[in-house]
Amino acid sequence: PTRWFCVQLTGVVSGQAQVFGPQSKTAKGTDAPNPTARVFILQDDAFPANIPEKRREGEHADLWFFLYFMKDRIKARGSKFWKAMAGFCYEPVHFVAVTPLVQSYLIDFAADPDMGGGYGSVISLVSVQFISTLLLRIGNYVQTTNRGRTGGVRQVAREQLLSKMLMMEHMGQHKYTGDHWFYSALVNV
């Protein structure tokens, strides 16, 4: 994948050198006033996160693509990724473990006080529920402030994929059909 353009060499910025090179024609067909050079910009990194070819085409390629994509997103987001992940992780603990158990014990203690449920047990269970709800709220705040609510992760990935497509040579662009590129850019990312 390359991008290239011509530049006119006008002078030496530092050091002792002289400007020489082939002349080129301007748009009007006359010789350019200064020597010109063709500049190539190469982008040889493989999306995502410069995944090696043996991982792209080897066994379990889907798993490797996912792992390298996550590596790329973690690198791009930094500590915000881990903060948002920690905020997300407490929600299932609260809704699946804490709340059903606390409510179950509260109903059991209310239905059968001889089972060991007194005021102390009820107050402690209500305290556990309150603390769990407080932790849920803190986790929600942390993940909301650190997750990037604009779809920034997808936008960056789509930009990288589009950049790779635009910088491919003509033969590379037509190696895959248009619908393959479209769905890779919009659905898979």
Image: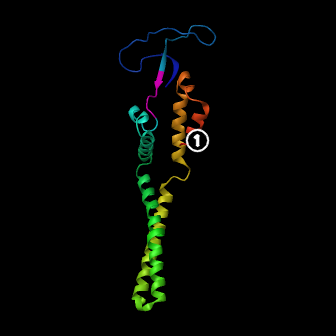
Q: Residue at x 54, y 40 (%)?
A: 158
Q: Position of residue 10 (x, y in %)?
A: 48, 16
Q: Is residue 52 above or below residue 189?
A: above
For this orientation, the residue located farthest to the left is: 16
For this orientation, the residue located farthest to the right is: 28
Q: Amino acid at mark 1?
A: Leu
Q: Is residue 96 above or below residue 149?
A: below
For this orientation, the residue located farthest to the front is: 59
Q: Residue at x 44, y 61 (%)?
A: 89
Q: Residue at x 56, y 26 (%)?
A: 173
Q: Position of residue 4 (x, y in %)?
A: 51, 21
Q: Which residue is mark 1?
A: 186
Question: For residue 18: magenta?
Answer: no
Its colouring scheme is rainbow
User: Element type at marker 1?
Assistant: helix
In front of the other: 130 or 182: 182
Q: Is residue 83 above or below residue 180?
A: below
Q: Which residues are magenta?
A: 40-46
Whether residue 50 is visible to the viewer of this picture, yes or no, is no
In front of the other: 50 or 9: 50
Q: Position of residue 70 (x, y in %)?
A: 43, 46
In front of the other: 133 or 11: 133
Q: Position of residue 67 (x, y in %)?
A: 42, 44
Q: Is residue 29 left or right of residue 90?
A: right
* Count of residue discs: 1
